[in-house]
Image (cartoon, rainbow, N blue to C red):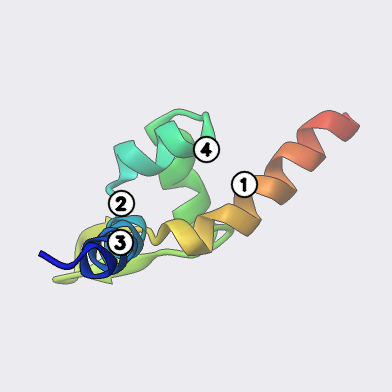
Amino acid sequence: MNRNFLVEFDRASSTISEEYPLTVRQAAKFLGVSPQTVYLWVERKQIPHLRVMGRNIRFLRSDLEPFRASFKQEMENE
């Protein structure tokens, strides 16, 4: 196989995995908080999220990155 193809394939697959929707538990782990805190933020519309099939909540890592940065900054300022 062509080596350039493998490099491009690796880049593409890593991009896809980064944008795979996260569950509440995965998002909580990523943010360093409890799942209950994530549910509270969703209820208060404080965190970007997606609703799948009406009830299931999912998050995109690209949406959580800026939220995590601002959340950590708030924690450091307290």
Density class for disc 3 (Cα within 10 Å; few <14, some 14-19, many ≥20) is few
Q: Is residue 36 left or right of residue 57?
A: right
Q: Is residue 20 left or right of residue 48?
A: left
Q: CA distance from mark 4 to mark 2?
A: 12 Å
What residue sits 44% from the left and 56% below the top?
A: 61
- Whichever of callouts 3 and 1 sits on the residue coming sooner in the sequence is 3
Residue denoted by label 1? 68
Q: CA distance from mark 4 to mark 3?
A: 30 Å
Question: Who is closer to the viewer here, 2 or 37?
Answer: 2
Pointer 4 and pointer 1: residues touching (CB < 8 Å)? yes
Location of residue 29 (image quadrant): top left
For marks 4 and 3, give the one nearer the viewer. 3
Pointer 4 and pointer 2: residues touching (CB < 8 Å)? no
- Whichever of callouts 3 and 2 sits on the residue coming sooner in the sequence is 3
Question: What percent of the width, then of the height, locates residue 13?
Answer: 25, 61
Question: What percent of the width, then of the height, locates residue 40?
Answer: 48, 45
For marks 3 and 1, give the one nearer the viewer. 3
- Which amino acid type corresponds to the residue marked 4 in the rendered image? Leu
Q: What label sits on residue 7 in the rendered view? A: 3
Density class for disc 1 (Cα within 10 Å; few <14, some 14-19, many ≥20) is some
- Which amino acid type corresponds to the residue marked 2 in the rendered image? Leu
Q: What label sits on residue 31 in the rendered view? A: 4
Pointer 4 and pointer 3: residues touching (CB < 8 Å)? no
Residue denoted by label 2? 22
* Above or below for 24 versus 10: above
- Which amino acid type corresponds to the residue marked 3 in the rendered image? Val
- Whichever of callouts 4 and 3 sits on the residue coming sooner in the sequence is 3
- Whichever of callouts 4 and 1 sits on the residue coming sooner in the sequence is 4
